[in-house]
Image: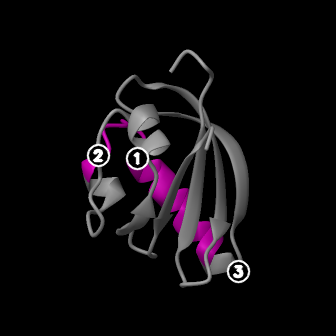
Amino acid sequence: MPFGAVEMDRSGKVLSYNKTQEHISGYTVPAGGNLFEVSRSPSKDELKARIMRAMDEGPVDLDFAWIGGSSHREVRLRILSSARGGFWMFVEADSAV
């Protein structure tokens, strides 16, 4: 896949992810780990709050640019509700990653 994919429960606990996400973010989040606890992004709390607000309002369908990962570079995020009650985060970075 040309983009990272992470499925999380409502709290941010990782249910599944792909190798591209490891490359984009610069670190591994094991299944069961919490993405928002291990993320090095200085704005991770703001990202979590934005996702939680969207989940409270109904099905999640967000698409926006974000500064993230260990390189603190801009990535494109697409966040969608998952069938398991959490959400999917799809991460796209430029080819220089």
Secondary structure of residue under mark 2 = loop
Residue marked by disc 2? 28
Left or right, 21 with reference to 79: left
Q: Is residue 49 magenta?
A: yes
Residue marked by disc 1? 44
| Crowd band around label 2 with a 10 angstrom C-alpha radius: few (<14), some (14–19), many (20+) | some
The residue lying toward the viewer, choosing from 68 and 47, is 68
Q: Is residue 4 magenta?
A: no
- Amino acid identity at mark 3: Gly
What is the quadrant of residue 4 in the picture?
Answer: top right
* Residues tagged 3 and 2 counted as in contact (Cβ below 8 A): no
Q: Is residue 83 above or below residue 75?
A: below
Residue at 40 percent of width and 51 percent of height: 45
What is the quadrant of residue 16 in the picture?
Answer: bottom left
Mark 3 or 2, nearer chain start:
2
| Helix, strand or loop: magenta stretch | helix
- Amino acid identity at mark 1: Lys
Secondary structure of residue under mark 1 = helix
Residue at 55 percent of width and 84 percent of height: 85
